[in-house]
């Protein structure tokens, strides 16, 4: 197990290094002056020069890349004469490990730079304010998809070939074929506008909102319902079909026939033997969909005005806020890698025959 984790962490490091490099080249080789993006149209040459010097835009591409890696690395080297390194409110947050004559080795949190458009606000703070809302939305959406999809898949497998099976398959196919942004518009208009008096739901809204007097922040769980349902429609359809096909395959195995020969009922065979063994492909789908939800909730969050990372990415793209886009991509890539490692461990728990290599 330890050897497996070390190997996986090594692969994760190389993957993240590749993502960091690609992201840097994509965004820092784009045409345009980042200093002008930050200052707008009313800048002077003195202001531009000051911003370029502060953020290192006046240096060569290679130097910027080295500084970019140094900012992201938890172990990094910094000048002893710099006052950017403090414990709380400085540019970097961490502790000094080893001091040399002119530099020190630091253990710090990764520094994702500062937003171009939010008055120098740290990107880590921007992501910290929005990512929890996206995670909540993704967790609720995948939970809805998993619970309903597994039930529909089992029902479809037990009724193979009849009208129940055909109906579920038809609905699943329609669910997979409809784009999320189209479903979001339909659900918002239907349940948030036309049927608002019956549902009590609104077309848009975030998890936290100010009250009518603009004084207190209130928790609005009802605003989670529509975006979570819309975001869960496509994975629900995939899970339903995967569960159906996997359960039918498992039910044809010899040990299932043996279980029936021992006098077990169909309910006992499914719950004690078939169901758990049929979950492997479903877990694969769930892990992939959950990771993609963190990046793919962009349109759903934007349409429902859900204050999450996806909505923040759209706004950053509209304003060319490159540090926010870069930070969001790196955070999503890190979460994706962590989820994949966790899924491999779940495989072993579901099926002891699976070996960690």
Image: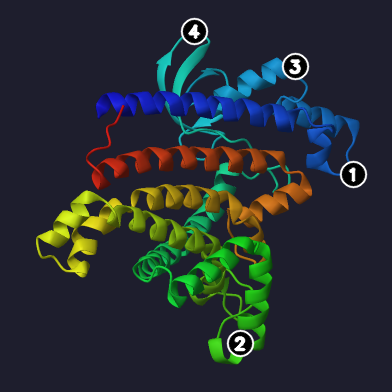
Query: What residue appears at the point 72 percent right and 31 percent down from the top-left corner?
Result: 26
**Mark 1 neighbour class, 10 Å CA radius: few under 14, some 14 to 19, many 20 or more:** few
> What residue would you read off at disc 4?
101
| Quadrant that contains the N terminus | top left
> What residue would you read off at disc 1?
41
Which comes before the other along the chain, label 1 or label 4?
A: 1
- Local SS, label 4: loop
**Mark 3 neighbour class, 10 Å CA radius: few under 14, some 14 to 19, many 20 or more:** few
User: Cα distance, mark 3 to mark 1?
Assistant: 25 Å
Tag shown at residue 196: 2
- Local SS, label 2: helix
* Foreground residue among 186 and 173: 173
Say whether marks 3 and 4 touch (CB < 8 Å). no
User: Cα distance, mark 3 to mark 2?
Assistant: 57 Å
- Local SS, label 3: loop
**Mark 4 neighbour class, 10 Å CA radius: few under 14, some 14 to 19, many 20 or more:** few
Q: Quadrant of residue 53?
A: top right
Total labels drawn: 4
* Foreground residue among 151 and 170: 170
Tag shown at residue 60: 3
Instruction: Give the farthest residue toward the top.
Output: 101
User: Cα distance, mark 2 to mark 4?
Assistant: 68 Å
């Amino acid at each position: 197990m330890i050897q497996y984790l070390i190997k996986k962490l090594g692969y994760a490091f190389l993957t993240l290094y590749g993502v960091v490099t690609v992201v840097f080249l994509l965004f820092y080789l784009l045409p345009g002056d980042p200093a002008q993006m930050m200052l707008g149209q009313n800048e002077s040459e003195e202001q531009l020069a000051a911003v370029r010097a502060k953020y290192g835009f006046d240096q060569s591409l290679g130097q910027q890349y080295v500084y970019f890696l140094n900012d992201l690395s938890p172990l990094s080297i910094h000048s002893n004469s710099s006052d950017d390194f403090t414990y709380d409110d400085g540019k970097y947050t961490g502790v000094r490990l080893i001091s040399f004559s002119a530099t020190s080795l630091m253990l710090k949190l990764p520094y994702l730079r500062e937003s171009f458009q939010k008055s120098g606000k740290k990107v880590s703070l921007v992501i910290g304010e929005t990512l929890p809302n996206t995670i909540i939305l993704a967790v609720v959406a995948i939970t809805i998809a998993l619970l309903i999809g597994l039930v529909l898949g089992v029902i479809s497998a037990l009724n193979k070939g009849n009208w129940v099976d055909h109906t579920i398959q038809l609905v699943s196919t329609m669910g997979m074929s409809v784009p999320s942004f189209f479903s979001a518009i339909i659900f918002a208009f239907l349940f948030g506008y036309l049927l608002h008096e019956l549902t009590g739901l609104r077309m848009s809204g975030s998890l936290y909102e100010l009250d009518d007097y603009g004084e207190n922040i209130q928790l609005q769980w009802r605003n989670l319902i529509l975006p979570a349902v819309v975001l869960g429609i496509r994975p629900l359809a995939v899970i339903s079909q995967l569960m159906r096909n996997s359960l039918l395959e498992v039910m044809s195995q010899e040990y299932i026939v043996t279980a029936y020969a021992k006098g077990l009922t169909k309910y006992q065979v499914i719950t004690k033997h078939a169901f758990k063994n049929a979950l492997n492909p479903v877990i694969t789908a769930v892990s992939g969909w959950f990771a993609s939800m963190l990046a793919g909730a962009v349109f759903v969050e934007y349409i429902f005005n859900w204050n999450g990372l996806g909505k923040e990415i759209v706004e950053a793209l509209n304003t060319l806020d490159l540090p926010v886009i870069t930070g969001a991509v790196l955070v999503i890539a890190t979460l994706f890698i962590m989820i994949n490692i966790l899924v491999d461990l779940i495989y072993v728990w579901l099926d002891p025959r699976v070996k960690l290599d």
